[in-house]
Image (tube, rainbow, N blue to C red):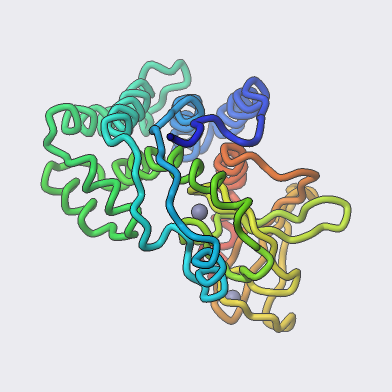
Amino acid sequence: MTLSGSPDTITDDAAMMRRLAFMIEESADLPDIKALVLLYSLILPLLREADLKVTPSVIATEEIASKMAEGVPLLCGLDLEFDEDAALDLMVRLAKAAERLDEQPQCIGSTQSVAHSAGSIRLALEEHKLDAGELLFSIVTDDSSSLISAALSLQLDPGLLRTIVQNTLKPALRAWCRQLTPLSDTTVWQKGYCFICGARAMLGELRGHNQARHLRCGQCGADWKISRLQCALCGNEDHKSSGYFRPEGAGDKVRVEFCDKCKGYIKVFTSFARMAPETLDIEDLATLHMDCIAKNRGYTR
Ligand SMILES: [Zn+2]
Ligand SMILES: [Zn+2]
């Protein structure tokens, strides 16, 4: 038996693509951001249709409860199985999609160089000069060093390779997240990292009429509630050393929450309903200017 490849949250694909098209127009004067938005507009449809034939993870109810209580991500230490050929195929298709960046009518210098780098990565994968299994393992174990050295030894762009491999893994992580979330009592998880895969929270949501504060994982899409007062990164609850700001013109849809104790920040969105995993990537991209402001004020993500 494998887990369904289809997402749990129905998103309006047309609306998602319209949003990306609008962002491409808006980022006309910001070449690096425009390249990223163009890249995601090409790879998101591939991620939505991908099926890595994921085998359900085997974990007992008691183990779920003890891991949650001890702060250990549920996938940690489990045998995780999926179709490696399907993963390699997706990795190649993502690289091919990035390679098509220079065919886009909005193509600019920075997108051309990404397209060229993606072509080299695609070739290295097709010629088996890169080991897809090892690359995926480096992401699961959060060990960038092996991925970076593999990229550098073939004169490939390590950042782009990491983006491609990370995205390849997302459909599998999201399938396990859909399997394990209903079995988990997320109320005990007051952490800044994901209870499913261990990645650091990508962004927050103030959700619904009572503005319940949730954290979201950009890798597997997990969703967990966290106290209104707690720093999402270090747990600091002292309101004198934490706060938030809204950049001019940002409206009340999103704010940057910062903490002077750990010097971290996280973007927090006001939402009526849970954002779909793909929407997290898009909203993160749409607010990259806020990351610049936060970093200029001395905070890190
Ligand atoms: Zn996760
Ligand atoms: Zn903090």
The image shows residue 215 at horizontal and vertical percentages of 64, 58
Q: Residue at x 58, y 49 (%)?
A: 289
In the drawing, does residue 123 fall left or right of residue 45? left
Q: Residue at x 22, y 53 (%)?
A: 148
Q: Residue at x 49, y 60 (%)?
A: 60
Rendering quadrant holding ligand 2: bottom right
In the drawing, does residue 40 fall left or right of residue 88? right
In the drawing, does residue 41 fall left or right of residue 23? left
The image shows residue 130 at horizontal and vertical percentages of 16, 39
Vertical comparison of 231 with 241: above or below: above
The image shows residue 264 at horizontal and vertical percentages of 55, 70
From the viewer's side, name the closer residue of 247 and 201. Answer: 201
Q: Quadrant of residue 243?
A: bottom right
Residue 112 visible, this angle: no
Q: Residue at x 76, y 47 (%)?
A: 271
In the drawing, does residue 159 fall left or right of residue 288? left
Vertical comparison of 267 with 262: above or below: above
Number of dots carrying numbers: 0
Residue 71 visible, this angle: yes
From the viewer's side, name the closer residue of 29 and 3. Answer: 3
From the viewer's side, name the closer residue of 245 and 270. Answer: 270
